[in-house]
Image (tube, rainbow, N blue to C red):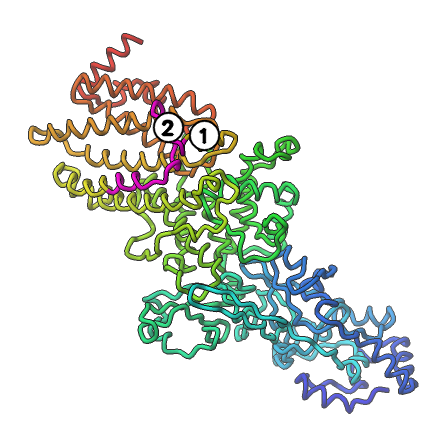
Amino acid sequence: MTSTSHLPHLHQTFHLPTVPHMAQMPSLQQSTPSMTQTQTQTQTQTPTQAQQDTSDRARAYKSRNKRPCDFCRYKKAACHLDHAPPCELCIRYNKDCTFVESPAKRRRPNDSNASNDLGKSTGAYEPIPATNGRGNAISFANGSLGGSIDMQQNILGWENGLQPFHISGIGMTPDMDPPDFAFDPALYQDTALAFDTFEPMSASTTTAETVPGKTIERRPQDSVNASPVSQADHLPVNLTLPIDTTSGEPSLDNQASSNAQIVGMSGEQDPYLLARYRYDQYNEAAFPSIRMRKMSGGPSTDGSIPTFFTIAHNALASKAQPVERIETMDKYRREVEEMVNDEVGKRLVRLFYKYVQPYYPLLTREGRRGRDDTGVRELASVPTCILAAIYGHALPFCAWDEKLCVEVYTPPSADALFRIAWLACMPMLHTPSLAVLQTLLLLVQRRPTNKHVSDTPMKWVMMTTAVSMAQALGLHRDCSDWPLPSWEIKVRRRLGWATFVQDKWIALNFGRSSHIQSDDWDVNPLTEDDFPDAERDGPDSQLGLRGQHFIKLCELTIIVDDIIHNLFSLKATRTLHNSLESTLEVAKPLRIRLTEWYQSLPPGLLPQPINTPRSPESSRRRSFVHELDGNANLHLAYITAKIELFRAMLRPKVTDANAAALAALRTGALAVAREVLDFLDGLQANELEAFWASYARTNFTIASSFMLLLFVTAPTMLDARESLSLLTSWRSLLRVKSRSCDMLNLALLRLDGVFVSGMETLIELSPSALQAWNDGEVSR
């Protein structure tokens, strides 16, 4: 019989409550003969046999490469780990690949009757991992036996077949009698508590990444005291979360189970106070549950504005809503994989990089693990939300893939993919990351599905969320000199500008105030160095225009932002709409800036108007007729900016004092109307089928409204006839071109509604416009 002299040692180590003597335990009276027989065999064993049984029960030590990680053990799956973590399954589920749980201990089996008596108290333990916003499993302390077992430390690696004392209600109330449970002698033997040597998770080498002027050394991963996996809903209030194993990781976005958010200038934490804290060699200061990362030291060190990030464990948001269980997130992943297999998925990703990325450079090929020979990330390592959004944007270009053009007869539904992208993204809003922002921007960029409306308010809501996410990630601050990997600096700068561009054009389309204020935007202009691989597969890469489309779009958007603020804000409209002189004074420098912007465009970047001699660069561009060309979107944005200027300048009423000036303005406005007509007429098939920004659809509609405005306000018969001719030609051209490009449907619908309803009954026409309309009715 095993001596109970070991029990005091157990109490000292595990703080167990006093265990009654075997004779006093009711469950012992109910023990089966097989258990007694087992105890007798234990007494009669020789020392050699006992040692042999101990070695049988204790699992032999295996290195990290030879034993499963915590998540594979939970999933009961093979852990394929060739080199350093993460393993294949953790990459697939985007989990934190850890080895913090001790290897399993094999215990002497009881017979079936004893097992039945023990019931759930000795049943197989199947931990359910708490999940963070990214879907990573998190290890916490969960168990407590009357509040006395210290499960915070990694002392017992509970695994299959061993879950002692896991009985609900133990120690919950002081007046409750202690529960009955079967006594297992093997549990109290010294050999049952002998653990294998555990190798903490560490990196064997350090990685140095160079940032201009700085060298960042990535330190080995620290060992972490972790506890068995538990559900987030049962987390103790006073739980001290484990520090993320990525402490010392130079990247802000590669945090395995944490998220980084910037510290605001006027928030609860004062950056100028944080600048006086002491930080380690990795620019970090550790606190309970969070780490503080220093990006710039402030006036006392380098004279810069102090910049800090809080790196908080994702478990802190475990109770935030909306939240999805891991089973739901896995269901989304399975739905995507059922719609698009890996072979088709990789081809769709390549199509995205070739036909979308050059004009909307959100993604990056750098700084990530798991890539194939062509540089495409392994699909298992890409979050479900962004993968579904990428597929949705790449589907229209399947005809340009040599295999998908003949093999994908029934492509998946883009609507279903975007729906999954949104649903899988929502729970991750609590734990911001670059992937979440990329998904939101791709969702905002989606073309509308209803031809009768420009956009629903949901797009405005999603844009608001995207701006909030970008600000939480600090993308409104310039990160050029931050101690980050070079790839992350580039992608953060591009994402910051992508958010800026999308927000300003949607504000223009909706006619609402922008979410981003110029006073709180401090990101340096983009350069070609920010596009290491942005357009290497596109036609522009062969013309030496790496990143120029997006760089010029950002420059144009800055001018558009000033147009919105200076001419179309509520206060500006109230001040200027009755004063032509004041309006011209505000608009003049903006017109000059637009002209200078157009003159600075690289040769061959924009399509040339029809009926004009083509430059050698333009002719060379037309030689790529088999390639899609998305640069027409930039030209349309430029014309739209000019239309907005003339809309503001034509607002004041005609008086004797300003009649001559308004007549000159109308001449310029008619020239812009002819320019947009020639632009649409000159669009080729490879341009109509290329990538168009979502706001381009409304830009075409703005052109329709502008031409209609010029006609109904025509002051003379000559002006009215010319305006009506442009309007009818524009409508006819839209009918033809919209058959090849659905971006033109709304612009055509707006005009069709006016013509069918009867313009003279629907709109108050000027006398000249009414006469021209009636003359046109007679001729028709």
Question: Tag 2: residue type?
Answer: Arg
Which of these two is toward me, 690 or 171?
A: 690
Find residue 622 and name its label. 1
Reading the image, the residue beneath label 2 is 614
Question: Could you tell me which residue is drawn at 71 percent across and 64 percent down?
Answer: 73
User: Does 650 appear above or below 232?
Assistant: above
Instruction: Specify few, some or many for label 2: CA neighbours under 10 Å numbering under 14, 14-19, or 20 or more.
Output: some
User: Does 278 appear above or below 68?
Assistant: below
Q: Count numbered badges in the picture.
A: 2
**Residues at discs 1 and 2 in contact (Cβ within 8 Å):** yes
Q: Residue furthest left?
A: 657
First of labels 1, 2 by sequence position: 2
Image-quadrant location for residue 637: top left
User: Does 512 appear above or below 730?
Assistant: below
Which of these two is toward me, 736 or 181?
A: 736
Query: Residue 689: x and y, percent?
Result: 48, 31
Mark 2 residue element = loop
Query: Residue 556: x and y, percent?
Result: 32, 43
In-image side of 475 versus 199 (left or right): left
Q: Is residue 745 magenta?
A: no
Query: Residue 368: x and y, percent?
Result: 56, 57
Question: In the rendered structure, which segment of residues is drawn in magenta?
Answer: 593-618
Query: Residue 225: x and y, percent?
Result: 61, 76
Question: Could you tell me which residue is drawn at 58 percent across and 70 percent down?
Answer: 206
User: Does 137 appear above or below 735?
Assistant: below
Rendered-image quadrant of the N terminus: bottom right
